Image (cartoon, rainbow, N blue to C red):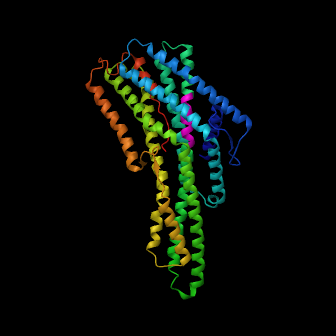
Amino acid sequence: MHRVTYWVLLIHHYYMLAVGIVRFRYDFVADKPHTTTFITYYSVVANVLTICSLPWIYHTSFNVFLQHDRIGKLALYIFVGSRTLRVLAVVIAIVHNWLRREELLTVIREFNFLRWTFFSRFTVAAPAQRHFEIKIVRNILSGLMIDVSGFIMILFAYSEQASSEFILSSIMFTFVSNILYLVINQYYFALRTVILFGNLMNQQLTDIMKFTEHVASLQHKHRNHVQFKARCRLLSQELDELSVVYWQLQTLAERITDIFKWQGLGVLTNMYIFNVSLIYTVVSMLWTGEFTVSHYDWVAVLMATTSVVYLLDVREFLGLQLEHMDIFNLKFLHLETYSSLPPLDKALERSVERFHMQLSINKYEMSLLGLFKFNGEVGFSMFASMLLTMSVDVIKVASTPFLETDMLYMSSKDDTLLFISISVRLRFPTE
């Protein structure tokens, strides 16, 4: 698994270099990022060309869409809304990514320094390492699968009338949209690393508390008084060091979230419209009977697979937010063990008090663009609201004739497949 992860990350990194998303070459052997003048200028040229090509891509896809004989109002609204949001999101991602490029490099170097100075002394358990690698590889491959399947369905929808210009614009739109997927992969990988380091810290704190219980049993044994004092001083030093590392890791997590904060706007604005268009398309095709598995079985399987992978991807991303928040909030539970112990050495007690005060003052929290705090209830509400919106849409489709102009009019397989193609999700993190 380690070799597979290495090659997947290596290919993924060089693909980001080719696209112009990253401004450094990462040495996976020495674990160091390197910047060069060529990479910097290349990324500038790549980003400028990408932004300049967006108007032509948007104009071409819009003209092809209007060539259909009959287009419902809702179809037009969804198409214009989703394409416009996607284009704006790409521009924001490119500009914001460029403005924060130096800070991203600084965070990577501080991550490596923290790993070399503190976490290198610990051994990551094999199950935890395997879980970390599987999550990273799955995130990369799932995003790639959704983008590629969306492109395939676009070409299938316009197979009878696709011109070379449209095919080129579709390829470029998929390529440009892939930038969003690359940006979110950076955020996902960073938070997964925070979770891995945070679990090591929690395990170390648990070991310290367990050893403190053992030391407490030596307190009333007169012959072990010197040993008791020495062990208390050792525990105090380890706890002070752990509190410093905890603060550094929390600061890095906050800076990572701040670097990618504007991508959170993509989640709030695109999660609903893309999911509505996705479920609307599938249900419309099945309800009208114009699209059947017997006619286009492989496309039906591809659509169903894409929708399932998409929902799992949204669930995984929301779970990632909550999981990395729990890493920092679990410290309170570990320190509560100390309150049940008898009074110990003054230095150790001061260390525990300082650590507890640090956790109380610098409690780790997230917010969605500063509007409201993100927690388990908010995450569940977002996911449940998304599914509820889909269910309401299904009922609406099932109870309303398709010939009404205000409804999505599915007149041919081209119209139905189109909405799967524009339903490819916008993969943005929350702040």
Q: Nearer the viewer, residue 335 or 364?
A: 364
Q: Is residue 164 above or below residue 310?
A: above
Q: Residue at x 73, y 34 (%)?
A: 38
Q: Is residue 181 magenta?
A: yes
Picture quadrant where residue 308 is located: top left
How many numbered tags mark residues here? 0
Q: Residue at x 43, y 74 (%)?
A: 340
Q: Is residue 267 above or below residue 401?
A: below
Which region shows up in magenta? 176-186
Q: Is residue 97 above or below residue 364?
A: above
Q: Is residue 249 magenta?
A: no
Expressed as whole percent of the image width and height from the top left, the position of residue 392 reads 30, 33
Q: Is residue 402 left or right of residue 82?
A: left
Residue 132 seen anywhere in this rendered image of the structure: no
Expressed as whole percent of the image width and height from the top left, the position of residue 288 reads 32, 20
Q: Nearer the viewer, residue 256 or 330?
A: 256
Expressed as whole percent of the image width and height from the top left, the position of residue 271 reads 43, 35
Residue 146 seen anywhere in this rendered image of the structure: yes
Q: Residue at x 48, y 34 (%)?
A: 426
Q: Is residue 333 above or below residue 281?
A: below
Expressed as whole percent of the image width and height from the top left, the position of residue 61 reads 50, 19
Q: Residue at x 33, y 20 (%)?
A: 289
Chief secondary structure of the magenta span?
A: helix
